[in-house]
Image (tube, rainbow, N blue to C red):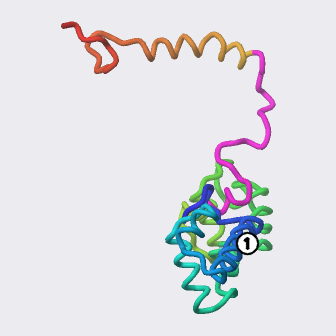
Amino acid sequence: MRYPQGGGLSADRRAFREHIRMDAAAMFVAGQGNDVIAKQLRGSVRSVQRWRRAWEHQGPNGLRSTGPASRPALREALFAVLEQELAKGPAAHGWPDQTRTLARIKTLTGRRFHKSFTLSGIAKMLRRHGFSRQVPARRALERDEDKVTGWVKDTWPQAEALRRRSEPGSASRTRPDSH
């Protein structure tokens, strides 16, 4: 099962789901059927069947949570080191500009930790730790809020209207037929 933001279940959520499986074990002991248990616990019959098999082979311990599905790509201590390296900026690592890209972070983790990640793996790891893409940490000093607000109110609607206007001969499918 895939989860949003590339992460797994939180510890609280794993405990909650383990509690549901333990409730199912009590119902197994009471002799209730899989379909009844699934309906009562608001789960699938297939999951209840899987839980029943685990319960029959291993008892209640077969229904306990085994922890996160996978180990983190970098341990917390190593990720803290990566954060320190990222805080130094790209120029400190030999790049000519201050652009931070996934490819550069991949190169940095390879150099620093001798680990190889895919670009999507790097993106997931960063998202899990609260990083987001294309969001500057602070506003530019040169930013003029009044000019930005004026542009959004005045210029942008005009540009949007020009873009949306249907020209003769365009391939727009929203134009009424001329039959």
The answer to whether residue 119 is left or right of residue 132 is: left
Q: Position of residue 103 (x, y in %)?
A: 57, 59
Q: Out of 86 and 117, give the one closest to the viewer.
A: 117
Specify the segment rendered in magenta: 123-146
Magenta includes 61? no
* Quarter of the figure with residue 84: bottom right
Q: Give the vertical position of 81 relative to 90 (above or below).
A: below
Q: Position of residue 1 (x, y in %)?
A: 54, 65
Q: Residue furthest top?
A: 178
Q: Position of residue 8 (x, y in %)?
A: 65, 66
Q: Out of 91 and 82, give the one closest to the viewer.
A: 82
* Quarter of the figure with residue 9: bottom right
For the question of whether residue 123 can be seen, the reply is no
Label 1, on which residue? 19
Q: Position of residue 79 (x, y in %)?
A: 75, 68
Tell me the residue at 63%/10% (across/down).
154
Where does the C terminus fall, quadrant-wise?
top left
Tell me the residue at 66%/83% (across/down).
29
Q: Residue furthest bottom?
A: 57
For the question of whether residue 121 can be seen, the reply is yes
Q: Give the vertical position of 171 relative to 117 (above or below).
A: above
Q: Main secondary structure of the magenta part?
A: loop
